[in-house]
Image (spheres, helix red, strand yellow):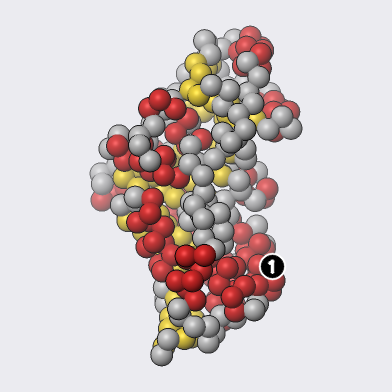
């Protein structure tokens, strides 16, 4: 059995009630279950529709995300999440670069790295090098003034943890940021790179080994093994090329507002919903959400 989930932006819920009925009839689906009025719904299917991606493309133009996945085992026991442009709305290194006066140059490198056009490790070393001699205190300033959480994150963490799931934040960014974000959202643990500083100034380098694509896969392997979970028990979420390894290995890998080149390699794509979409995909209704 499969489950088709339709969802839209919760800030402007606009799901037409005729839409799921039309799809259900065309695909021979089961009864429509509304997970949140005008925002999210699901229905069961006996087979994967042959025209899934054609319908997906049509619905994208209507501001609606469509995900079809196996019904069995979709409620997960672990969340493995990227940070930049996933759990927060910014790229931390870009914000630091703005403060250092090299914002445009660094943003261009970041965009190309996240699209998979550049080697992640080399791109990180180059960008960190441009931050040399920036006051270490700027990190706190950026955290307090520039970083905002992605909508739905608190509900996602609270609900999954209330239902016994473990949550890990794994980032190619920096521990100074993941520690704060993990605390704000309620992650059980976090992993990231460490910016090096001396005498209150950034040295323009980062501690080795660098946490990149392979390290995110290793985090999935190590944490799931430690918790005696299978990789199928894991939901991973990210947006960049360095997330593709963990997205492909996890039981459910969600490309969230991802770069087109990244989304094209993922079966689960959320372009219109926020982080609560990850709850709807597991069959939680809005009424099931834990207190944020």
Q: Is residue 273 left or right of residue 78?
A: right
Front one among 146 and 166: 146
Q: Is residue 76 left or right of residue 12?
A: left
Residue drawn where x is 29% and y is 37% of the image: 162
- Residue 209 shows up from this direction: no
Residue drawn where x is 53% and y is 83% of the image: 134
- Write down the quadrant of residue 287 in the picture: top left
- Residue 287 shows up from this direction: yes
Residue pushed farthest bottom?
A: 199
> The C terminus appears in which quarter of the rendering?
top left
Q: Residue 52 appears at what percent x and percent y? A: 65, 26
Front one among 114 and 98: 98
- Residue located beneath label 1 in the image: 108
Q: Identify whether 251 is placed above or below 104.
A: above
Q: Residue 116 appears at what percent x and percent y? A: 63, 59
Q: Identify whether 202 is placed above or below 149.
A: below
Count of marks placed on residues: 1
Few, some or many C-alpha atoms within 10 Å of disc 1 (few <14, some 14-19, many ≥20)? Answer: few
Q: Is residue 131 left or right of residue 64?
A: left
- Write down the quadrant of residue 286 in the picture: top left
Q: Identify whether 157 is placed above or below 65.
A: below
Front one among 130 and 264: 130
Q: Residue 41 appears at what percent x and percent y? A: 53, 22
Q: Identify whether 180 is placed above or below 263.
A: below
Q: Is residue 5 left or right of residue 160?
A: right
Q: Residue 289 appears at what percent x and percent y? A: 39, 32
In the structure shown, which secondary structural element does the residue marked by tag 1 occupy? helix
Residue drawn where x is 55% and y is 72% of the image: 96
Residue drawn where x is 63% and y is 15% of the image: 17
């Amino acid at each position: 059995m499969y489950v088709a989930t339709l969802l839209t932006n919760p800030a402007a819920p606009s799901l037409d009630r005729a839409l799921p009925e039309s799809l259900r009839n065309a695909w021979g689906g089961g009864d429509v279950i509304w997970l949140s009025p005008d925002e999210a719904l699901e229905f069961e299917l006996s087979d994967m529709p042959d025209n899934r991606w054609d319908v997906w493309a049509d619905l994208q133009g209507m501001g609606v995300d469509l995900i079809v996945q196996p019904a069995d085992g979709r409620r997960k026991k672990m969340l493995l999440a990227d940070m930049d442009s996933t759990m927060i709305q910014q790229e931390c290194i870009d914000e630091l670069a703005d403060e250092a006066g090299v914002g445009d140059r660094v943003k261009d490198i970041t965009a190309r790295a996240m699209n998979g056009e550049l080697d992640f490790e080399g791109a990180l070393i180059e960008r960190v090098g441009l931050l040399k001699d920036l006051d270490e205190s700027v990190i706190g300033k950026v955290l307090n003034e520039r970083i905002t959480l992605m909508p739905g994150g608190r509900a996602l963490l609270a609900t999954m943890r209330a239902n016994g799931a473990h949550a890990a934040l794994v980032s190619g960014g920096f521990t100074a940021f993941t520690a704060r974000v993990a605390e704000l959202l309620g992650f059980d643990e976090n992993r990231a790179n460490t910016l090096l500083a001396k005498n209150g100034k950034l040295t323009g380098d980062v501690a080795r080994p660098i946490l990149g694509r392979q390290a995110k896969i290793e985090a999935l392997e190590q944490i799931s093994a430690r918790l005696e979970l299978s990789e199928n028990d894991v939901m991973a979420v990210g947006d960049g090329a360095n997330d593709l390894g963990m997205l492909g290995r996890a039981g459910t890998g969600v490309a969230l507002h991802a770069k087109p080149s990244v989304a094209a390699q993922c079966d689960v794509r959320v372009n219109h919903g926020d982080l609560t979409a990850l709850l709807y995909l597991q069959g939680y209704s809005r009424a099931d959400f834990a207190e944020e």
